[in-house]
Image (cartoon, helix red, strand yellow):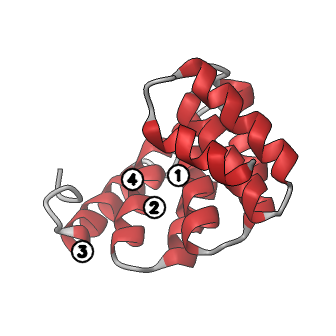
Amino acid sequence: MLIHLGRAEEALASLDRAIEIEPGLALGHMYRGAALLGLGKHEAALAAYREASRLDPKRWQARYDQGILLCDVLHRYDEARREFERVVELVPGNADARFNLGNTLYGLRRFGSALQAYDRAIELRPDQAAYHGARANAS
């Protein structure tokens, strides 16, 4: 809640306390990543997301958040691609993951593969204008 209220420092203190009490709490590490991201601490946020993924490899949300950070903020497209591919393995029907996989492939200049990812995202959610716009740009 504190993160959504723009109180990232306070959220981080609460999350640090939660992790101190229960170090294996994957969700705590994932939320810690979000708080750190809100504070502009990108590498620390990435480390927190990675720890959440290590603790709970099936927690696709932490991998998704890593992918977004790697692609959109850090422009580390190949690392982002691996995260989104893992999300797609875990949740094949996640259209947003397929869309963002397309974005990472586009960043890698793999336009044909990006187009395929966008097409699959559109199959899953044809009402998303952003998917169609990205598809047009990748064509």
Provide the residue designation for mark 4. Answer: 31
Which residue appears at 13% of the width and 60% of the height? 5
Q: How crowded is the residue under tag 4: few (<14 C-alpha within 10 Å), some, or many (20+)?
A: many
> Alpha carbon of mark 3 to alpha carbon of mark 4: how far?
12 Å
Q: How crowded is the residue under tag 1: few (<14 C-alpha within 10 Å), some, or many (20+)?
A: many
Q: Earlier in the sequence, mark 3 or mark 2?
A: 3
Provide the residue designation for mark 2. Answer: 33
Q: Is residue 102 left or right of residue 48?
A: right
The reply to whether the C-beta atoms of the residues labelled 4 and 2 are less than 8 Å apart is yes
Q: Is residue 8 above or below residue 125?
A: below
Q: Label 3 amino acid?
A: Glu
> Alpha carbon of mark 2 to alpha carbon of mark 1: how far?
9 Å
Q: Would residue 115 be seen by someone viewing this image from the given angle?
A: yes
Q: Is residue 6 above or below residue 18?
A: below
Q: Label 1 amino acid?
A: Asp
Return the x and y of residue 67 as percentages of the image width and height. Answer: 62, 54
Question: Which secondary structure lies at badge 1?
Answer: helix
Return the x and y of residue 103 as percentages of the image width and height. Answer: 66, 53
The reply to whether the C-beta atoms of the residues labelled 2 and 1 are less than 8 Å apart is yes
Residue 65's label in the rendered image is 1
Q: Earlier in the sequence, mark 2 or mark 1?
A: 2
> Alpha carbon of mark 4 to alpha carbon of mark 2: how far?
5 Å
Which residue appears at 45% of the width and 61% of the height? 33
Question: Which secondary structure lies at badge 2?
Answer: helix
Q: Quadrant of residue 108?
A: bottom right
Q: Label 2 amino acid?
A: Gly
Question: Which secondary structure lies at badge 4?
Answer: helix
Q: Is residue 85 left or right of residue 56?
A: right
Q: Label 4 amino acid?
A: Tyr
Question: Which secondary structure lies at badge 3?
Answer: helix
> Alpha carbon of mark 4 to alpha carbon of mark 1: how far?
10 Å
